[in-house]
Structures are given as structure tokens and as C-alpha cells.
Image (cartoon, rainbow, N blue to C red):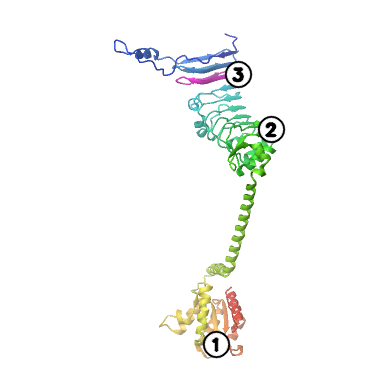
Amino acid sequence: MTKIKVFDFSYFPLRFKNPIFLDVKTNNNQTRVDQVQRKHTNKILPITVTFPNDKIQFVRITHLMATMYFKEIRVINSSLRHLELSYFETDVFPILTFGGFNSLKHLDLSGISSDITIGVGKIPLLIHLQTLIIKDAKLYNVLQTNMTTFSFCPNIVNLDISHNYILKIKSLGELRNLKLLNLSHNLLDNVPNIVSKLENIEELDLSHNQITNIGKQTLDWMDIQHSRLGTFKLYLSDNPLICSCQTITFLRWILSTNVKLDKNGNFSCWVASRNEMNYTRNIAEDIHHYFIKCESAVWLKLGVTLMVSVLSSLICITLLYNFRWRIIFFFFRNSRRFAEKGLELTFDYDVYVSYSDDCVRFVKELQGKIENEWGFKICIEDRDFIIGESIATERATSINKCRHIIFVVSPSTVENEWSRFEIERAKYEKFSKNLQKIVVITKDIALDNIPVEFSMIWKDVLLIQWPVEKDEVQMAWQTLRLWFF
């Protein structure tokens, strides 16, 4: 057969795998089954098939049932173009060996468990292979774990891995020349992301899967492929497509795209809102009639979103306005403490209050404003002085521990010797730059009667003449609060 070009060795039940015989008893109380099985299960040497003929181009060995196994199928310097080794029912799948030059372009391994072929490296590198068919090969296991599944055929153009119960595909490897990919008759519920990484793909078969919708990103990729390559074909028939508000983008794409669709894009789909089956083109051409509520829902969501945004903004603005002083004071105190730390200054109080007996009630009100509302700490004689210590020492020490000082000047202040002492101490602290600000609040006293001791520091003093009218009183509190800056 030196000139043979086609060799087909298929559909041969050479020996059934694991045969079962009738259990027939003999007079010697032994079964013929044992005798027959012993006869047919003698060890058979593995077979090596060699195709040395450089004329042979087509070899087909398919649907073979045998207990023996092919050890190796060897092709040496052959012109073999087409090789089909499919649906073997043997104990072990053969190793493929190509010696010398090989130009194999078509390989069909359908019906062979991928775990015992691709997984164990029984296939050599086939750089000229253009078409690879692997159907019914349990690829659902291999494609989720093996990143180099098709590394033995880096230049294939046509890949058929249909009928493999595939749920997800982790990787197909670097198949830069792949143009036709058949993923039909699987269990895919969307278009695998790895498909968009195949630069030259121009035909994709996703028929007979579990796809309900195709996302906008994938649709845009298909349009780009069609524009770049000049053609793109998509097969989607016999998928449980859904026509709903969520699939409007896909339905409109069917009418506008230049991608070639099987059935002219008129696929059956389930219309959830009407609980009926229809066709995608019918729905897409009258989409407003079918999904008028979707647009209302979109505007409703937009309105609710805007309303929530406005209300949130108003609430934030209101909170910021109502607590603006506390927020400002918070940042002011922290920045001031940072500056004082650099100057190595330490203060126990924010403000020292000097007053006479006739202003005790006003000082209590002042204390409530400064400490409870504004968040500053003040030092007053009736509460903070240590009992048993020298009054002069306590006043001098307390003023030294405060950033600022407030003098509440009343008619009795003029005759109060301790008030004069505190004024002199404030002068000293101001000149030594320990005291930062001095405020004088006059209560029921004319400016001409203010103690002359203030004259030396009058240019450094903030004067507030405390009013009687309520509106003016509010302005006075506001002025005092601003003074803390």
C-alpha cells in the first residue's frame, strides 16, 4: 500500500471492554464464564501503529472498542494532513509521535477524556495544526484548572470544543490566529471574558447554552471586531434569552449592529412582564410598547436619587451652619495648640476672668457661654483657686496659666485692690508675651470711671460695653465669641 492516501479504521468492536457472559453451570460444578473469561483476558501486548508512507494524507480511527490498547501511533516524515482519533473504548489512549517533518492541519480527538490526553501530555507540539476538534471530552474540568490546555497547537484557526458541559473557562492560552470558536452545546450563562482577548476571532458559536443576556461591554467588543476585521458572526439560537428592562440594550443592539447573527437575530425569548414567549426582533421593533414601565422606573429612580441628594446636601449644610462655631473652634484650638507646642508654651486654661462681687451673676452666665456652649475652659476665683494658698500667689499663678484674660469692670472694681493687682499682673504677662489677648467688659459703669491702670495697655485691649437691650446683648456675645480667634 505504498501509494495509499486514505486510511479509515473505524467502528470495530475488536473486543468489548469488560464483557459480561452468561453464568452457565457445567456438570463439574464450574462455570463456563470463568473458562471463557480466562481465555479472553490473557495479557495482550500493546500495539504500536506506524504510518511511514509519505503519501498518506487522511487517517481515521474512531469508535474502537477493545480490551487491548494502542501504545503509540507513530507518524514519520509523512504528508498526513487529517488525523481523527475519536471515541476510543480502550484501556489506555495512545501516545502520538511525529518523527521528522509533519504538516498535520486537522486533528479530531472527540470522545476522548481530556484528562488522559491533554492533561498528561500525550500530544506533541503541532505548529502547523489549523483545526482542532474536541467534543464530548470532559473539558469542563481541564479548562477551569489548566492555563496551558492548548499550548500544543499555538497556531490553530478553528477550535471546536462543543458538547463538553462547560460552565466557565479560565483560559484558552495564547491563540493569536484563532478565527472560529465553537462553544455550542455547553452550559455557559454568559459570554466568557477570555473570548474578548482573542484578537482575530471573527466567528463565535454560542448556540445551545444557558445565556439570558449579553452585556454592553461584550456587544461593543463584537462591533469593534466587525469594524476591524470586516466581518463577525455570532450564533445564539436555542438559548433561554430573556426580554426585560435589564436586556433593553441587547435588544436594541440586535437592530443596529452590523454583526451577522444566525436566524437574522430573531431569537425566541421569554417576556417576563407578560409571562409569554416571543421573538427578539418583534420586541426590539416595538420596545416602547413592551417596556414603557422601564423608562418610568428609570425616571423614578433618577428623581428619587436627585431628591435624596438634595435632602442630604440640605442636611449637611444645616448641620454645618448650626455647628459652624464648634467646627471652627475645633480647628482653631488644634492649630493653636500645634503652634504653642512649637513655641514650648503650655496653658491650663483658655481664659482668666477678673471680677468683683457685684458681677457674680454675670460671671456665672459668662461661664455657661464660654465653657458649655463654646467649649473653652475658664479660670474663676470662686471655683479654681486652691484654698489655703496665698491669694496674691494664686491670682498671679492662675493668670500665668491662661492664654487670655477678661476683666469684668463694674462700679466696685474701682475700689477693689485685687482688681488693680490683676491689672498689673496682666501688664507683666502681656509684656513678657505669655498673655495673648485682654478683654475689658464694662457693666453699669461709664468709660470715664474705668481704672486708670488700663491706660498703659489700652492699645492692646478689646473693649465691650455691655448693653441692656436683648438684641444688642446678642451682638455683644457674638463679638466676644469672635474675639477668641
Looking at the rendered structure, the kind of residue marked 3 is: Arg
Residue 46: name its quadrant: top left
Residue that numbered label 1 is attached to: 410
Asked if the stretch drawn in magenta spans residue 93, the answer is yes
Helix, strand or loop at disc 3? loop
Q: Residue at x 59, y 38 (%)?
A: 276
Identify the magenta region: 78-103
Q: Nearer the viewer, residue 455 or 109?
A: 109
| Callout 1: SS | loop
In this view, the residue farthest toward the left is 28
The residue at which mark 2 appears reads as: 229
> Which numbered disc covers residue 426?
none
Rendered-image quadrant of the N terminus: top right
Give residue 447's position: percent from left, percent from top: 61, 88
Q: Earlier in the sequence, mark 2 or mark 3?
A: 3
Return the x and y of residue 463 as percentages of the image width and height.
60, 82
Q: Quadrant of residue 27?
A: top left
- Across and down, in percent, residue 49 comes to 51, 14
Instruction: Establish if 423 lies above or below 69.
Output: below
The mark nearer the N terminus, 2 or 1, is: 2
Compare marks 3 and 1 and give the one earlier in the sequence.
3
**Which residue does the numbered mark 3 point to in the structure image?**
81
Residue beneath the point at 61% across and 58% down = 307
Quadrant of residue 194 within the rendered picture? top right
Give the alpha-carbon distance from disc 2 to disc 3, as whole Å. Answer: 28 Å
